């Protein structure tokens, strides 16, 4: 789903439908959407508006099977097009008719419909598939996390390939219905609201709906044995949290943190503006990995984050991403600072509010922690490279950059920028340079030198003059 500024006139729409593209002029959609770090992620030639996934998962064998129905619109006359996917495909239908398909590269599914698809035309793709995601390696790894009682899809930037076919790039957001049947006694967790739970023949089907634009890597699925808590926020939004029954010693701290989701989201709304989605929550499966992920409306947390007791800071981080990352997403994966710099800065603001150190103090501390010869300073947060997307510099130097901006423009403009950007770009995308231009517009100051110093210089900048807040 891309926001368009123009709507074709009725006459143009009529022509598009009335004049079939001749096979001669229709061409294949590009195998990538044009990302500078990952040229083969996403695809060209169409735009997805909705994914409907109807799946069955068997925890003992890690067997996933089912059907994806992808609702899309052609953006060129298409002779064929790709979806990104790594599991075994059994059948593909386009517009209800069998389509030829082949795999290429390590995650490309090439689909050739029986007839070309005209530009502007809506079409549906049905993909029947199956696989054992933990056994499917791409580039030597699987993003699917196996647990003793199930499995979890939560990773960045790739996660979807192991559980549904997609146009796998944040530029093409869509809505989702995810319906997963699991053995009775097991739960399936996904994004958004739980529309229904039905049991029959030993299987329970969980049907989730995420009906705000959502990037593919922010779609999540977790199957396992969970304790589920439900609540509503003061504004009436549903809060659904899920905790693996097998968190051992970390169970109490996990709850003491994730149960504060509504409180943290309310506080963040004061900083970033209204919460952009219509459901909240978090889930903690019994994985052994250490990262968390801002899966839309329902972040993924690892039990290891709660090993030292409560960790509300990680909840602040993942919820901050709901504005910076999820509602407003990167245009290109090189823009990762627009996600991580802000989520880290939100943690610093939380610390400031809790009386555990101001953002200025934390910025000064991080700055002093890393001597000039530290490799930390060689990573440019504004363009860290694909191998350093999640390098500490993107987070910490990235947050220092925001403190430098705050000092430059003063608190009033700084907080107007933090709130204005997610409002102006809601459900869309933005680059580092777009944010820079926005900050210049709001503050009326040239900020090129500041952004270049903090985000685009591969050495330690001289310390920012610490200024009193609110110039
Ligand atoms: N966006 C995530 C976070 O900052 C980081 C994900 C890192 N991904 C990974 N596979 N380690 O919370
Ligand atoms: Zn993050």
Image (spheres, helix red, strand yellow):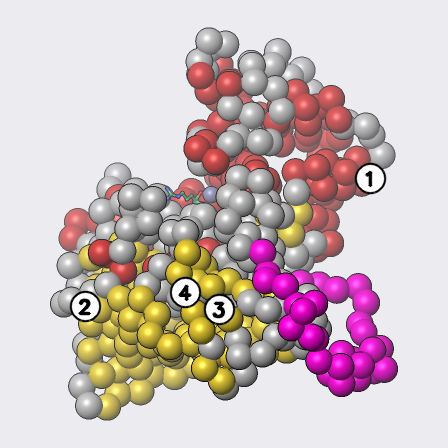
Residue 102: which numbered mark, if any?
4
Disc 2 designates what residue?
59
Please, what secondary structure does the residue beneath circle 3 have? strand
Is residue 451 among the parts visible in the rendering? yes
**Mark 1 falls on what kind of element?**
helix
Residue depicted at x 68% and y 30%: 406
Question: Nearer the viewer's eye, disc 1 or disc 4?
Answer: 4
Query: Which residue is labeled 1 in the image?
Result: 441
- Coordinates of residue 73 in the picture (x, y in percent): 63, 72
Coordinates of residue 237 in the picture (x, y in percent): 52, 71
Magenta stretch, residue numbers: 1-30
**Label 1 crowd bin: few (<14), some (14–19), many (20+), radius 10 Å:** few
Q: Does residue 27 belong to the magenta stretch?
A: yes
Is the residue marked by circle 4 packed among few (<14), some (14-19), or many (20+) residues within 10 Å? few
Q: Residue at x 60, y 14 (%)?
A: 461
Q: Earlier in the sequence, mark 3 or mark 2?
A: 2
Q: Is residue 357 visible?
A: no
Q: State the separation of the CA atoms marked 3 and 1.
A: 45 Å
The label nearer to you, 3 versus 1, is: 3
Locate residue 144, reporting x and y percent: 30, 55
- The local secondary structure at tag 4 comes to strand
- The disc label shown at residue 111, or none: 3
Q: CA distance from mark 4 to mark 2?
A: 29 Å
Among numbered discs 1 and 4, the one appearing first in the sequence: 4
Distance CA(mark 2)–CA(mark 1): 52 Å
First-in-chain label (3 vs 1): 3
């Amino acid at each position: 789903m891309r926001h368009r500024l123009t709507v074709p006139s009725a006459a143009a729409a009529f022509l598009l439908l009335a004049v079939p593209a001749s096979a001669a002029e229709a061409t294949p959609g590009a195998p990538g959407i044009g990302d500078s770090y990952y040229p083969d992620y996403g695809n060209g030639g169409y735009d997805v508006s909705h994914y409907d996934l109807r799946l069955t998962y068997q925890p003992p064998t890690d067997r996933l099977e089912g059907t994806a129905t992808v609702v899309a619109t052609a953006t060129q006359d298409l002779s064929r097009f790709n979806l990104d996917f790594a599991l075994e495909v059994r059948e593909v239908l386009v517009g209800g008719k069998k389509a030829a398909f082949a795999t290429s590269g390590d995650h490309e599914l090439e689909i050739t419909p029986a007839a070309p698809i005209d530009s502007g035309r809506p079409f549906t793709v049905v993909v029947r598939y199956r696989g054992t995601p933990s056994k499917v390696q791409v580039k030597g790894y699987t993003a699917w996390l196996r647990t003793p009682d199930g499995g979890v899809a939560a990773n960045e930037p790739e996660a979807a390939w192991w559980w549904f076919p997609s146009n796998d790039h944040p530029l093409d957001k869509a809505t989702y219905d995810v319906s997963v049947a699991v053995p009775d006694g097991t739960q399936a967790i996904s994004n958004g609201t739980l529309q229904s739970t039905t049991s029959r023949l030993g299987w329970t089907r969980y049907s989730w709906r995420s009906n705000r634009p959502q990037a593919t890597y922010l779609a999540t699925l977790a199957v396992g044995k969970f304790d589920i808590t439900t609540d509503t926020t003061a504004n009436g939004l549903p809060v659904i949290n899920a905790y693996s029954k097998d968190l051992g010693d970390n169970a109490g701290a996990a709850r003491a943190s994730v149960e504060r989701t509504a409180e943290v989201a309310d506080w963040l709304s004061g900083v970033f503006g209204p919460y952009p989605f219509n459901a909240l929550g978090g889930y903690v499966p019994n994985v052994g990995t250490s990262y968390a992920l801002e899966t839309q409306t329902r972040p993924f947390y690892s039990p290891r984050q709660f090993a030292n007791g409560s960790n509300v800071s990680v909840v602040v981080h993942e919820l901050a991403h709901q504005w910076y990352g999820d509602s407003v997403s990167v245009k290109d994966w090189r823009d990762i600072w627009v996600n991580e710099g802000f989520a880290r800065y939100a943690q610093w603001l939380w610390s400031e509010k809790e009386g555990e150190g101001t953002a200025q103090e934390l910025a000064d501390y991080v700055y002093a922690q890393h001597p000039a010869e530290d490799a930390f300073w060689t990573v440019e947060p504004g363009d860290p490279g694909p191998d350093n997307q999640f390098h500490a510099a993107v987070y910490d130097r990235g947050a220092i950059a925001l403190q430098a901006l705050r000092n430059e423009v003063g608190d009033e403009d700084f907080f107007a920028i933090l709130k204005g950007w997610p409002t102006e770009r809601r459900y869309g995308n933005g680059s580092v340079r777009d944010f820079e231009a926005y900050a210049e517009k709001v503050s009326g100051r040239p900020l090129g030198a500041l952004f270049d110093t903090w985000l685009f210089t591969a050495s330690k900048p001289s310390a920012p003059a610490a200024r009193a807040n609110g110039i």
